[in-house]
DNA sequence: ATATTTTAATTGATATATCAATTATATTTG
DNA sequence: CAAATATAATTGATATATCAATTAAAATAT
């Protein structure tokens, strides 16, 4: 029951894949924590790895532009996942901190996120995943350089 | 100069791929026709194949929800790419028609869209593409059924 | 040291995404 | 047939995407 592909290119399948994955991810996350999005989660995880990231760096890491990140973080501050303080060493930047609520959310959602990934990639061999990654990176390079 | 992957999963690469592809597509389309988006183009192409599609069917074909399609088509009507008339056989639906402007836009953009796809997939063997499609469809199935 | 250029982040405008609720029409069922 | 249910599309609310313009601060150049 594979849906037919109106464009006849695998690029369509790539889009479909990421949409299905985001859908199931958001659904599973929403069952545990109702006021957070997939992208906001990713911001938490990234900051949890390294609090020194600037908004710009976070944007690059998750393929958003600066405007989007500004608004995402704004909302996360409003919802008390993050605290934002001026960076006194470079007053153009902010230092971001994760609140208690942020920490406990990470703890709640980490297993869910892990499970989402496992679910999505279930039944794929390491070899297939490696190949997938390799081919996708070729496409990325093609798009960037042409 | 492959960007590092903060999540450590190929799902991140999938997302990156589609974003890069959409970026280059929009850029190349915008150079020829300035007031149209990638998705609006796709709607034109799909209707050009078959005018009988309902909004709901178009939505399914390009992975949008009904609300998005309503607004996309609304804009396309306003910009005079499409005409919308009540379907007298089922008054919940609309019949969509492509205007002259729509037709000439398709003619202008078809080669661009084709080129975008060729560019993105440049250097990939038929075998690699087939494998890519196969693996992606596994992921789609995983997301849908779990 | 001031003028110029870069950089980080914000803001505004418009398009799209998503969810829930609503409307209008069709279909099904008792 | 009337009531209940289902379907297609719209609308409202909120989040995100994207582009261009702006602001404030930092880095560089003369």
Image (cartoon, coloured by chain):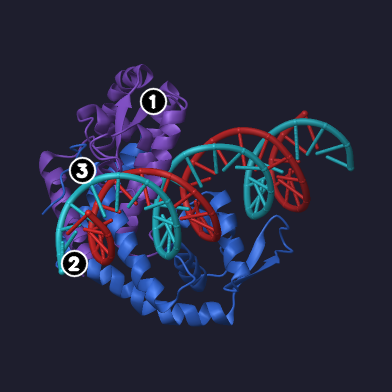
Chain colours: A purple, B blue, C red, D cyan
Give the chain of mark 1. Answer: A
Find numbered disc 2 in the image and state the secondary structure of the residue it sits on. helix
Q: Residues within 10 Å of mark 2 (few under 14, many from 20)?
A: few
Q: Residue at x 43, y 36 (%)?
A: A74
Is any atom of residue B124 visible in this view?
A: no
Give the chain of mark 3. Answer: B
Q: How crowded is mark 3: few (under 14 residues within 10 Å), some or many (20 or more)?
A: some
Residue tagged by mark 1?
A: A81
Q: Residue B8 lies in what quarter of the image?
A: top left
Could you tell whether B48 is left or right of B22 in the image?
right
Q: Residue at x 72, y 62 (%)?
A: B89
Q: In which quarter of the image is the C terminus of chain A?
A: bottom left
Q: How far apart are marks 1 and 2 (CA)?
A: 38 Å
Which label lies toward us, 2 or 3?
Answer: 2
Residue tagged by mark 2?
A: A145
Give the chain of mark 2. Answer: A
Residue A63 drawn above or below residue B126: above
Residue tagged by mark 3?
A: B10
Pointer 1 and pointer 3: residues touching (CB < 8 Å)? no
Which label lies toward us, 1 or 2?
Answer: 1
Pointer 1 and pointer 2: residues touching (CB < 8 Å)? no
Find numbered disc 1 in the image and state the secondary structure of the residue it sits on. loop
Could you tell whether A78 is left or right of D11 in the image?
left
Decide which of A118, B39 is in the foreground and name it: B39
Q: Residue B76 lies in what quarter of the image?
A: bottom right
Residue A102 drawn above or below residue B80: above
Is any atom of residue A106 visible in this view?
A: yes
Decide which of A146, A75 is in the foreground and name it: A75
Q: How far apart are marks 2 and 3 (CA)?
A: 21 Å
Tell me, yes or no, whether dots 2 and 3 are on the same chain: no
């Amino acid at each position: 029951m594979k849906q037919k592909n109106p464009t006849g290119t695998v690029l369509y399948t790539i889009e479909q894949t990421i949409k299905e994955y985001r859908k199931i991810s958001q659904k599973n996350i929403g069952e545990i924590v109702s006021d957070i999005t997939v992208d906001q989660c990713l911001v938490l995880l990234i900051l949890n790895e390294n609090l020194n990231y600037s908004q710009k760096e976070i944007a690059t890491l998750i393929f958003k532009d600066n405007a989007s990140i500004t608004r995402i973080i704004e909302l996360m501050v409003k919802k008390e996942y993050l605290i934002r303080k001026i960076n006194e060493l470079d007053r153009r930047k902010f230092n971001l901190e994760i609140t208690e609520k942020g920490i406990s959310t990470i703890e709640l959602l980490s297993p869910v996120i892990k499970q989402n990934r496992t679910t999505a990639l279930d039944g794929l061999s390491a070899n297939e995943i490696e190949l997938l990654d390799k081919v996708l990176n070729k496409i990325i390079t093609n798009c960037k350089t042409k």
